[in-house]
Amino acid sequence: MYKFFTKNLLPVFLLLAVSVQSSFAQNSILVNLGSATCDSPYSPAFSLIGSPLSANPNLFSLCDMSQQLPNYSNVFIAYNPLNNRIYIDDDRNIDTSKVWILDVGLPGNIGCPAVIPVSPTYNILNYYTAYFEFDNNGNVLSLSNYNGAAGMCTLDRLDVTTGKVIASQVLQFPAGHFPNVFGNGDITILPNGRLFVVLGIYPSQLYEITNYSNPNDVPVVTYLQSMPANTFGMAYLNGQLEITGTDEVHSCYYYNYNIGSNTLGPRNKFQAGELPIDNSSITPAIGTTKQLINATLVNSNTADVTYEVYEQNMGNVVLNNINATEDLGAAFGAANVSNVTVSFEPNGNGAGLILNSAYNGTTITNLLDPNQDLPNNVSNNTNYYFKALISCRVTNLRTDTTYYNSIIGTGMIGNGFTATPVSDSSNNGPSTVIDPNNDGDASEPGENIPTPFNFASLVPVRFMNVTASSNNDAATVKWTVATPTTDADKFEVDYSTNGTNWQAATEITITNPNQSNYQYIQNNLPSGNVYYRIKEIDNNGYTTYSRIVSLNSSGQNNFVVSPNPADKLLQINAPYGTVSNCTAALYDATGRKLTEVTITNNITEINTTRFPDGTYLLRIQHDSDITTQKVLIVH
């Protein structure tokens, strides 16, 4: 905007914030050029304001520019993502622009430069850089040559070190919404490239410019909103536009424009009581996605699972301490996760990051070694993101459960009082769903959906019921399966006299995928207890087992405990329909209770790895019925 305000100017002082920022997927820092107060404007200064949209913004730094600028008329400020520097452009002389390049400590400790030279870093000759803003490649975008009658101007790309115009495109503003004044307004470029402009007074009008990235294309200017009051500055903060204004007397204000919903918020008092003239922003931002790319059935309750995780620096500043937390144990149970591996995908580690060799998915959940940086996207490269594959074996899976899993990406800029952390919970799917509404904020509703894994999708046959009954010296084994039995080849009926050593009694080929009920009659029963299970074999050779049932003298099913002897696990198979009011307790030879579990599923397991070899008693109580049997543990 034209900085047409001139007042008496007094010194300002450096201030430091005293609190650490809270953590979001985007946690912008507002860069304001103006003055320290609104009611009585003082010297020109620029400030860095953390948590700008919160109820208590943090004024990191207020940097005096009174020795460099006589006032703030016709002065612009912009942040350059290419080198993480602040640029101040004094355009009061239309033939020469004075430019200061200031190091504010990014991405480390943030604050005012120790010394701001009185003389500019360099001068730009023969170009008036109105609406001074950087794209992610370090080029300045500027507007010039406005024709009010035709509603047209040019969008220029500049080399900021020389003032040379790299490329120009013609902008045509929509009929009925030509800017009435060209010298008041601002331009903002999001890290993802979206371009917004606010121009004019009475009213100021907000536009988005699209199709501008290729200089050979014809840009499109879309009118978005007329502002309720005159606005002259604009910055991109946490997925929104902050559009600022002042009457330079008693009112300094801003409006939020929600990019995702295209709605304008209410008028707010400008942050930290300051006066805004021109704005920019530093935008630490991160986004993550996760998708299940492979799952292979191992047996009736085990699968090998592979996820692809993607993490991207979505902001305009280098992120320090980049990492990703992947807790497989939280999804599947730590004892059920093994064989964990992690690796970068080909061409998925342009930043040269180092994986955490100790990562195991349960007790150690950070994928990366600490103290690594992830660059921002400043050109067509691949160093601003990483892709990794995480594989593991998971056991004790159930077909009636969906297992949800997320990855949490983290990073930060600054340290100490100026630490500004960001984090994001992954969205389910490939990298293309990291920010579906393309507003640069990956943490909005609908953009943090956990990744599901359904074991039932891998199992060709799901057993609904298994029973065994006897008549004289013959046993009848019946089972029911869910239909259709897709990719299933045959059933094998196995029997055992001890629940540990099994023999095949018969095979039954599956000829009708819609058949749900099967049976087998075994003659000449062995003496004593007999155990049965059904083994399904699918077309690929994978197998699925039913629960174990037993046949005793009463011809009724009871609780079946196997294997016996046990090594790592003791499995309790409950009769169908008896998984309520059931407990199982394991006692040592002295009668001391070692562990107790509630039986809530047809198959319940007790981890026996921590118990020494020996003889134990397992006590199972169902309602008022109690049974006790001897169990051997042999490692």
Image (cartoon, rainbow, N blue to C red):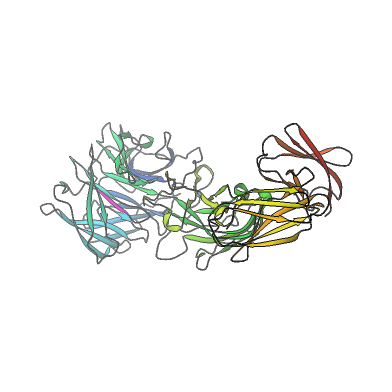
Question: Hey, which residue is sitting farthest right in the picture?
Answer: 590
- In depth, the one of 220 and 541 nearer the eye is 541
Q: Magenta segment range?
A: 192-197
Judge from the rendering whether residue 40 lies leftward or rightward of residue 511; answer left or right: left
Judge from the rendering whether residue 250 lies leftward or rightward of residue 514; answer left or right: left
- In depth, the one of 390 and 316 nearer the eye is 390
Residue 513 within the magenta-colored segment of the rendering: no
Q: Position of residue 553 (x, y in %)?
A: 80, 44
Residue 196 within the magenta-colored segment of the rendering: yes
Q: Is residue 629 above or below residue 152?
A: above
- What residue is shown at x 72% (from left), y 32% (from top)? 623
Judge from the rendering whether residue 328 lies leftward or rightward of residue 34; answer left or right: right
Q: Position of residue 380 (x, y in %)?
A: 40, 65
- What residue is shown at x 22% (from left), y 57% (from top)? 220
Q: Looking at the rendering, which quadrant does residue 63 occupy?
A: top left
Question: Hey, which residue is sitting farthest front in the picture?
Answer: 472
Q: Position of residue 360 (x, y in %)?
A: 65, 55
Q: Position of residue 265 (x, y in %)?
A: 31, 37
Question: Hey, which residue is sitting farthest bottom in the picture?
Answer: 346
